[in-house]
Image (spheres, helix red, strand yellow):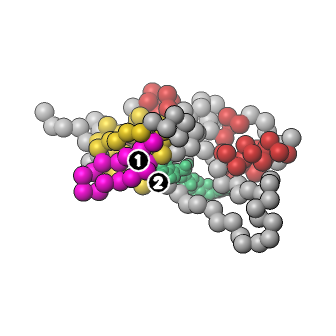
Amino acid sequence: MEKKRRIVVVGGSAAGPKAAAKARRIDNDAEITILQKDGDLSMASCGYPYYVGGFFDDRNQLICTPTGVIRNPQFYFNAKAIEARVNTEVTAIDRAGRIVSFRNTVTGETGEMTYDKLIMATGSVPRMPPVPGVELEGITTLQSMKDADFLRKIGD
Ligand SMILES: Cc1cc2nc3c(=O)[nH]c(=O)nc-3n(C[C@H](O)[C@H](O)[C@H](O)COP(=O)(O)OP(=O)(O)OC[C@H]3O[C@@H](n4cnc5c(N)ncnc54)[C@H](O)[C@@H]3O)c2cc1C
């Protein structure tokens, strides 16, 4: 029997889940895992300003399908047989050995996983402009759910 291909996707915002879903369409038998550093998956970043601005209150609207189903690990498993691990940061990649190392950002637990194909979807990191006052409390970027949660909280 042929061995199942193991596909690991690093990053679980916009590009990662898309890539994982495409991989599933191409290979119905593959073992597909998304390793996502943040606690949420498939976030609608374009909605952050509206959430922060109080146009709606339910944070889940940023992570749900048009029919209101929250895109959490259970959703990916049920809908596409994709394993999604949140709060899981990839800390090293051994390309020769085809192994990723990861750490759970909540529990600190570490682990390793082998892969046949590795997809990097880690996005970008915002740059803070070097202007005076940038280090003051309340100054933040608006790039992640964490940023949106923070701004929403201090705006209340
Ligand atoms: C406020 C705002 C408004 C926007 N509005 C629009 C819009 O109207 N229209 C539009 O087309 N685009 C918009 N964008 C841009 C769009 O959101 C991005 O282009 C898109 O999110 C990029 O997706 P990505 O998956 O490539 O990267 P990201 O969204 O940056 O996601 C990368 C993910 O990888 C994870 N990650 C990083 N390193 C690791 C690691 N080592 N291990 C595991 N996981 C890791 C991160 O935690 C992150 O969740 C907006 C963005 C923002 C911030």
Query: Callout 1: 10 Å neighbours few (<14), some, many (20+)?
Result: many
In this rendered view, identify the residue nearer to me: 141 or 112: 112
- Of 85 and 32, nearer the camera is 85
Expressed as whole percent of the image width and height from the top left, the position of residue 110 reads: 41, 39
- Of residues 44 and 134, the one nearer the viewer is 134
Circle 2 — which element?
loop
* 121 over 88 or under it: above or below: below
**Quarter location, residue 82:** top left
Whether the residues at callouts 1 and 2 have beta carbons within 8 Å, the answer is yes
* Residue ID at (67%, 45%): 146
The magenta span reads 90-103
Name the amino acid type tagged 2.
Ala
Image side of residue 114 versus residue 90, left or right = left
* Numbered label attached to residue 9: 1
Q: What residue type is labelled 1?
A: Val
Residue 15 visible within the image: no
